Image (cartoon, rainbow, N blue to C red):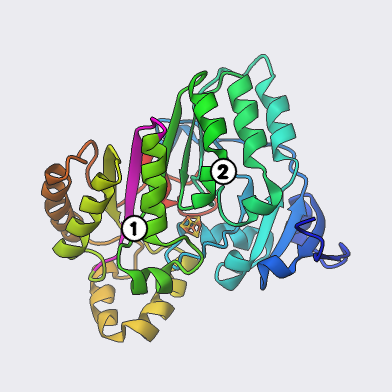
Amino acid sequence: MRWQGQTLDADDGALPGLERAGFVRSVQTPEFEGVTFHEVLCKSALNKLPESSGLSFKWTINPMRGCSHACRYCFARTTHEYLDLDAGRDFDSQIVVKTNVAAVLRRELHRRSWRRETVALGTNTDPYQRAEGRYRLMPGIIGALTDSGTPFSILTKGTLLRRDLPLLTQAARVVRVGLAVSIAIGEQDLHRSLEPGTPSPRARLDLVRALADAGFSVSVLVAPVIPYLTDGTSHLDELFAAIADAGATSAVAFPMHLRGSTRGWFLEWLATHHPALLRRYRQLYGRGAYVTPEYSAWLRGRVEPLLARHGLNRDTVAESAPPEHEDRLSEPDPQLALFA
Ligand code: SF4
C-alpha cells in the first residue's frame, strides 16, 4: 500500500485551534518529508460568502487548510493563525485535512433548502495541492456536486487535477464546470524561489493544454503580478503568448497584495533575494497592503494591450482592493478575483 510507511502520532499534542477544528490525529509519512497532516472532522463543507463579497458565486469549499505549494505571496497564510499555527513555515507544512468533507457536503447538498448555486473551489487554499494525492477528497466532492445538479468552478496550480479529468468531463455533461489554472510566474528561477511547492510553469501550461483538449474553456490567472519582478513587458508578453498557445480562452492579472503576516513573510524573502528593491516596495506599499492606485493604473495600461494581442482579453487587470474574505479571517486569496 502506498502509505504503508506512514507513522501516526497520537492525538496528544493538538493545539487549541486544531481542537476547535475537529482534530482527530496527526500523520507524518516519508513520502511527504517535512509535512504533517492534521486530520479533522468538519461539521460543514459549504462556506457562505458575505453578501458584501461582490463575487459571482456565494459558496465555497475548502477541503484543506494550509498549502504545501508554499507560495511566498499567498494571501491565505493568515488563516493558519486562527488554528494557533503560524502563517510562515507552518502554513506550508502543517496541513489540515477535512477527511469527511465529501460526506458532509453530500448531506448539505441534499437539504431541501439548497438552491444549487455555483460553488467555487480553490478560493483559499489549493484543492489539488500534493496532499490530495494522499487523501483523494476531490473525486467525492465532484461527485456530490454533480449528483446534486450544482454548478462549480475549480482554480488550481496543481497538475494533479489531470487525475480527475475524466470525472470532470462527465460532470460537465450534467452541470456547468469552470476550470482555471494559476500561473503567475514564467521565469524558472523566480518560480522555484517564490512558489517552491508548485508544479513548474511548463507543467501548468501542459495542464491548460490538457483541459482545453478535453473541451473546457480554460481561464488563466496571471496573478499576483509581483512589482519590479514579473511586471516587465517581455515577461508578461512571453507568458501570455505561452498561455494562448496552450489553448486558454482568457487570462486575468492583478498586482500583489501584502496583508497581515504575508507582508512580513514576503518582505523577508525580498530582503534576502532582492534587497535593492526594499526601498521601492516601501514607497509602493507604504504601510498598507495594496499598491498605489498609480501603479495599478500603470499595470493595467501595460497588461490590457498584451492580453488583446494574444486574444486573452475577456477580463483585464482587476482593481487592487479585492472583496472581503469568505470567513473574514484574512485577506482573500487572489484566486477569488478571477471570478469577480
Ligand atoms: S497561492 Fe494558492 S497555491 Fe499558492 S500557497 Fe496559496 S493557496 Fe497554495
Residue pictured at 22% horizontal, 61% vertical:
292
Residues 257 and 143: in front is 143
**Residue 319 appearing in the image:** no
Residue pictured at 69% horizontal, 53% vertical:
134
Residues 181 and 259: in front is 181
Disc 2, disc 1: CB below 8 Å? no
Residue 289 coordinates in the image, percent (x, y): 36, 62
Residue 159 coordinates in the image, percent (x, y): 49, 51
Quarter of the image with the N terminus is bottom right
Q: 111 left or right of 159?
A: right
Quick check: is 103 in the magenta stretch?
A: no
Residue 186 coordinates in the image, percent (x, y): 30, 62
Kind of residue at badge 2? Arg
Above-or-below relation of 199 to 177 = below
Above-or-below relation of 199 to 22 = below
**Residue 95 appearing in the image:** yes
| Callout 1 crowding tier (Cα within 10 Å): few <14, some 14–19, many ≥20 | many
Please name which of the two marks, 2 or 1, marks the residue nearer to the observer. Answer: 2
Q: Which mark is residue 163?
A: 2
Bounds of the magenta segment: 214-227
Quick check: is 223 in the magenta stretch?
A: yes
Q: Which mark is residue 184?
A: 1
